[in-house]
Amino acid sequence: MAENNYNEILKQLCHRLENFTESGVTVTPEMSLINQLAIDSIKLLNLIMEIEDTFDISIPINALVDVLTVRDLADLIYKIESESK
């Protein structure tokens, strides 16, 4: 992985997720999207649309099956972004 690019994706993702959670919550890569951040299906769809716009990628819904943590989502974004270059 290109460390700088991956770290930037992770940083942007954590920042975006803070907008979807209760105020005062600091999002970390190990946090569970569902259990700890309470990202429901509506929030997830909105988040995916923001991510797609921000990173100029398309995330297939079936790719989200294995995404449980913030880091899993960052890994998916990095993978899709890398494959599109």
Image: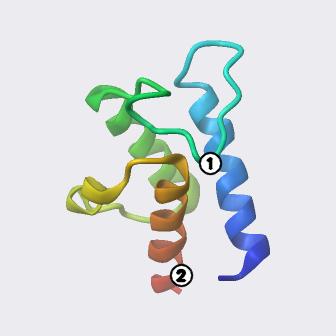
CB of mark 1 within 8 Å of CB of mark 2?
Answer: no
Q: Along the line of sight, which residue is nearer the eye, 71 or 46?
A: 71
Toward the viewer: 65 or 8?
65
- Other-residue count near label 1 (Cα within 10 Å), few / some / many at <14 / 14–19 / ≥20: some
Seen as rendered, the residue at the extreme right is 4
Residue placed at 71% from the left, 28% from the top? 26
Q: How is the image coloured?
A: rainbow
Q: Residues within 10 Å of mark 2 (few under 14, many from 20)?
A: few
Residue type of the residue flagged with mark 1? Pro
Q: Residue at x 62, y 48 (%)?
A: 29
**Which residue matches tag 2?**
82
Residue at 66% across, 41% down: 28
Specify whether 64 is left or right of 32: left
In the rendered view, tell whether residue 48 sits above or below residue 42.
Answer: below
Closer to the camera in the image, 84 or 30: 30
**Of callouts 1 and 2, the N-terminal one:** 1
